[in-house]
Image (spheres, rainbow, N blue to C red):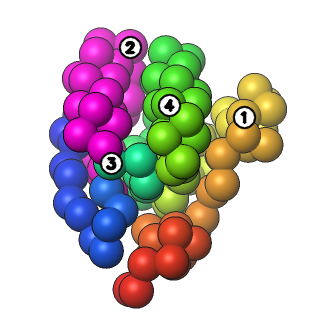
Amino acid sequence: MKLRLRREDGVAVMAVEGSLSQENVPLFRTRLDRLLEEGEANIVVDMTASGYISSMGLAVLVAAKNRATALSGDVKIAGSGQLITNLLRITNLWRKFDMYPSVAEALRSFGAEV
């Protein structure tokens, strides 16, 4: 798994490339924690190039969302495929996260000019 970070109009976009498995979760958590510690409270997690997320990965997303909300921000998911979308529905987490078909749409939801 690779994580790529870019910033667009005040929003951090973290692209997850490859499977977000149990082995990769510590790196994912560290990167999200670092963003939040630096005051980046608006985050889009781009899952376009990922086809899998483990239960631990979901837990990290929930924790990051809670921290971002406490900082008056949000964590949104973009580009999740059918498998990840189904997993979020099965776990009822689709109610917790705003999900968008593309990063551009997620960025616009933050008011970013794309």
Q: Mark 4 highlights which residue? A: 67
> Disc 4 versus disc 1: distance between alpha carbons?
16 Å
> Disc 2 versus disc 1: distance between alpha carbons?
18 Å
Q: Mark 1 highlights which residue? A: 93
Category of crowding for the residue at label 4, using alpha-carbon neighbours closer than 10 angstroms: few (below 14), some (14–19), many (at least 20): some
The quarter holding residue 114 reads bottom left
Q: From this view, report whether residue 54 is shown above or below residue 12.
A: above
The quarter holding residue 89 reads top right
Category of crowding for the residue at label 2, using alpha-carbon neighbours closer than 10 angstroms: few (below 14), some (14–19), many (at least 20): few
| Kind of residue at disc 3 | Glu
Question: Which residue is found at the position 51% from the left and 59% from the top?
Answer: 78
Badge 4 vs badge 1, beta-carbon distance below 8 Å: no
| Kind of residue at disc 4 | Arg
Question: Percent from the top left, x then y, of residue 13?
Answer: 32, 57
Question: Which residue is found at the position 48% from the left and 41% from the top?
Answer: 71
Q: From this view, report whether residue 49 is shown above or below residue 113.
A: above
Q: Label for residue 22?
A: 2
In the picture provided, is 12 more to the left or to the right than 3? right
In the picture provided, is 80 more to the left or to the right than 50? right
Q: Mark 3 highlights which residue? A: 40
> Disc 4 versus disc 2: distance between alpha carbons?
21 Å
Q: What is the magenta range?
A: 13-39
